[in-house]
Amino acid sequence: MKKLLIIHTTYNILGGEDVAVQNEIKVLNNEYIIETIFFHNNNFLSFSQIISYLTNNNKKSSLVVQEKIQEFKPDVIYIHNTWFKASLGIFKIIEGSKIPTYLKLHNFRYDCTRYLLSKNHLNGNKTCPKCGLQRKTFNFINKYYSNSYIKSLIVIRYGKKYFETIKNTNIRLLVLTQFHLDYLLSLGFSSKKISVLHNPIDSSSNNQSTIKSDYFTYSGRISEEKGVEKLIKAFLKSNINKTKLKILGEGPLLIELKKKYEFNKNIEFLGLVSNNKSQQIISQSKAVITFTQLLEGQPMLLCEASSYGVPSVFPDQGGIHEFYPINCSLSFNHNYESKAFDVLNKLSDTKLLKKEGMRNKQFLEENFSDAQYLKKFKKIIFNNE
């Protein structure tokens, strides 16, 4: 069996990327010998961490990777997130090993963090569609972290070097959608080093429920760029406002929105819940809804919903539509709020919800099964050596 070394830096708060990496490891374990290196960021800044930020090289992390390569002797190295604990120093170690290496890009951070000036980042937009950064008066520096210029300058320095690394070295890139591949081509990346490989979506044991509870669900980060308040406002104006809207997750707007809508009995904020609880809530929803303002990679909420036969309401932007059959009647143009409002009003049609849920589940099973993922993984990774 081929041996894979998987490297990932987890986030302070468990997020969709962390869960996707865990799920992918489970699937790959069926056909490959897996060893993993998980780094963990923390809020405590030691002297060595400060040095690693300034040099873009965490010597401890590099040593861990070097020793694991020597001990495990992998056939392929597969990297996910390196920000910040893994650091850029591991790429030099890996390049020296001459082992074929793949890096999966789950988001567009590599592009947003490589600019010193905010005008170059925003490129004429009021809001960056990739990360949600907003244009503000007198904010000349690309303030990626809104609460700190120092942290922003550190991440810009990291981002510039990271962009150069992924563009100009032999590392091959994996992206989740054709949209993202085309975006990289527009930045001058070589098509020969990029492949589309979705995250595994296990729908085999997720039976479609014939009885749905009387609520709709949003699950994810509670923030402005995710469009959560826009969703709430549209929901309250729609003809489904007598139904509950369950909102799962944490984020900077959670306390503010809870206070603002605390007297509305049909808006329920559940905060951060366990993965099992989240799956249970989603599986019984009449539909899941997102008003995200961002170019998403592979939206976990929507794919999980499809695996249960639960329909999704979503803005048709970026690559989201690639996970749905053509002519999806519950998507909307994110530039027009009236379109989103029209779609929400459709959610009172029970027959339509059932039809769309069945279509989505069938499309998912036909195009994104574990077997198809493994077949595509093998073709991309081991036919390119």
Image (tube, rainbow, N blue to C red):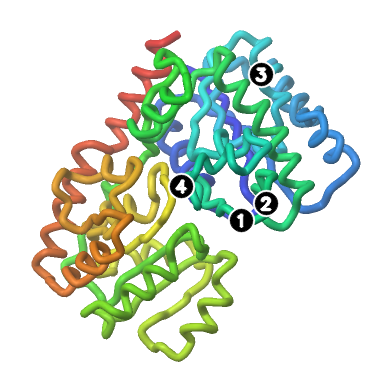
Foreground label between 4 and 1: 1
Answer few, some or many: residues within 10 Å of disc 4's Cα (few below 14, many 20 plus, some between 14 and 19): many
Q: Which SS class for mark 4?
A: loop
**What residue is shown with label 3?**
69
**Residue 151's x, y, as percent?**
75, 47
Q: Which circle's residue, 3 or 1, is located before the other in the chain?
A: 3
Q: Residue drawn 41% across and 88% down?
A: 264
**Residue 212's x, y, as percent?**
22, 72
Give yes or no for contact between labels 1 and 2 (Cβ–Cβ under 8 Å): yes
Distance (Cα) linking label 3 and label 4: 38 Å
Foreground label between 3 and 1: 1
Q: Residue drawn 40% across and 26% down?
A: 31
**What residue is shown with label 1?**
136
Q: Residue drawn 57% across and 25% down?
A: 5
In the rendered image of this protein, does residue 63 appear above or below residue 133? above
Check the image and name the residue furthest to the bottom.
Answer: 263
Asked where in the image residue 93 lies, by quadrant, the reply is top right
Foreground label between 2 and 3: 2
Distance (Cα) linking label 2 and label 3: 44 Å
**What residue is shown with label 4?**
129
Foreground label between 3 and 4: 4
Asked if residue 152 shows in the view, the reply is yes
**What mark, if any, has residue 139 been given in the picture?**
2
**Residue 293's x, y, as percent?**
42, 55
Q: Which circle's residue, 4 or 1, is located before the other in the chain?
A: 4
